[in-house]
Image (tube, rainbow, N blue to C red):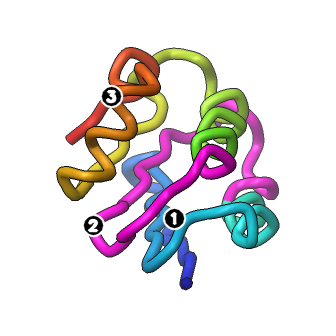
Amino acid sequence: MSISRKVDSDKGVVIISIEGRFDFSEHRPFRDTYRDIAPGSMRFMVDLSRADYLDSSALGMLLLLREHAGTDAGRVTIRGCTEDVRRILRIANFDRLFTLE
């Protein structure tokens, strides 16, 4: 599992890329990608194109990121989901809380 981030200050967006399993073992590294950014100051894009699994704790981590970013659905975009991951997000009604690309 690997989590990385790229900050594009000009566009006001933080891109968080996740590779492999996205589960509770990644709680701290995921939180570390955004905790030093002032709440509500940036938009976030979570790239799951290389994630092959996520569990309920990953859903909780995404909710914490949404809270940090601001609760407007456009503040956090999730992109690159496999069909399995997209199905999980839809079952959890995350398509109503986040922008899915």
Q: Position of residue 32 (x, y in %)?
A: 77, 66
Judge whether 13 appears above or below 75 on screen: below
Residue 41 is labelled as: none
Residue 90 is labelled as: 3
The quadrant the C terminus occupies is top left
Judge whether 47 appears above or below 70 on screen: below
Q: Secondary structure at mark 2?
A: strand
Report if residue 53 lies within the magenta region. Answer: yes
Sequence-first disc among 3 and 1 = 1
Q: Secondary structure at mark 1?
A: strand
Q: CA distance from mark 1 to mark 2?
A: 18 Å
Judging depth in this view, the residue of 60 and 55 nearest the camera is 55
Span colored in magenta: 34-58
Identify the residue shown where x is 73% and y is 51%.
37
Nearer to us of marks 1 and 2 is 2
The answer to which image quadrant residue 69 occupies is top right
Q: Which residue is mark 1?
A: 7
Judge whether 51 appears above or below 60 on screen: below
Residue 49 is labelled as: 2
Nearer to us of marks 3 and 1 is 3
Q: Position of residue 63 (x, y in %)?
A: 64, 33
Identify the residue shown where x is 55% and y is 84%.
1
Q: CA distance from mark 2 to mark 3?
A: 16 Å
Q: Secondary structure at mark 3?
A: helix
Sequence-first disc among 2 and 3 = 2
